[in-house]
Image: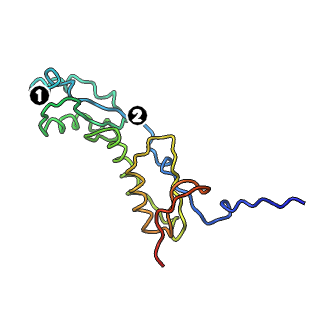
């Protein structure tokens, strides 16, 4: 007679948390403002403003946008503000920085507004691998958020997890 196989993970109180589930759908786009600078290096205000005014920003409708300058140009603060103002009401979100910084800001908003009450006093495992670009910072943010309610936090998969946090008794 064969012994019955029992799935102890399925029967445990362990709760899974997958950051990938909170990935905001939509296009991610980088806008390099050097395209509007003279030889990619010099900002001439009148030319810069004219270039922005003739750019069709509606192509960024519902995009998440990261604004960068790929050259060593010295760009005044108002220039970034001006680009941002052209994207207002068009893009979902705009940040100054890389795509990873953009993704971090998107996750920051999601995690700040996340209700984690379902994880109260529970052991939680934060899934490690994802198919979507989850920034490293998001793992720190969710750890901080879950620590306020969870009994323990682990990272990885149920079969091979790494302990991260355990509430003191």
Please say if the residues under marks 1 and 2 sit with CB atoms less than 8 Å apart.
no
- Residue 4 falls in which quadrant of the image? bottom right
Left or right of 39? Residue 144 is: right
Pick the front one: 94 or 140: 140
Residue 14 placement (x, y as % from top left): 59, 63
Identity of the residue drawn at 52% across and 59% down: 162
SS under mark 1: loop
Mark 2 surroundings: few (<14), some (14-19) or many (≥20) residues within 10 A: few
SS under mark 2: loop
Pick the front one: 128 or 17: 128
In the image, residue 17 above or below residue 29: below
Residue 124 placement (x, y as % from top left): 53, 62
Left or right of 66? Residue 52 is: left
Identity of the residue drawn at 11% across and 37% down: 76
In the image, residue 5 above or below residue 76: below
Mark 1 surroundings: few (<14), some (14-19) or many (≥20) residues within 10 A: many
Of marks 1 and 2, which one's residue comes earlier in the chain?
2
Residue 163 placement (x, y as % from top left): 50, 62
Mark carried by residue 157: none
Pick the front one: 100 or 54: 100
Whole-number angstrom distance, CA of label 1 to CA of label 2: 28 Å
**Tag nearer the camera, 1 or 2:** 1
Residue matched to label 1: 43
Identity of the residue drawn at 13% across and 40% down: 77
Mark carried by residue 27: 2
Residue 84 placement (x, y as % from top left): 23, 37
Where is the N terminus found, in terms of image quarters?
Answer: bottom right
Left or right of 52? Residue 12 is: right
């Amino acid at each position: 007679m064969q012994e019955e196989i029992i799935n102890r993970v399925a029967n445990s109180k362990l709760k899974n948390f997958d950051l990938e589930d909170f990935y905001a759908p939509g296009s991610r786009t980088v806008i390099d403002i050097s395209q509007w600078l003279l030889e990619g290096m010099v900002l001439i205000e009148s030319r810069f403003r004219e270039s922005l005014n003739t750019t069709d920003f509606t192509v960024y409708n519902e995009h998440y946008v990261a604004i960068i300058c790929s050259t060593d140009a010295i760009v005044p603060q108002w220039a970034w503000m001006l680009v941002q103002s052209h994207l207002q009401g068009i893009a979902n979100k705009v940040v100054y920085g890389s795509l990873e910084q953009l993704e971090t800001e998107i996750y920051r908003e999601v995690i700040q507004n996340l209700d984690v009450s379902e994880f109260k006093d529970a052991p939680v495992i934060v899934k490690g691998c994802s198919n979507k670009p989850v920034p490293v910072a998001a793992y720190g943010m969710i750890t901080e958020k879950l620590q306020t309610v969870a009994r323990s936090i682990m990272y990885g998969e149920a079969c091979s997890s790494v302990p991260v946090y355990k509430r003191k008794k």
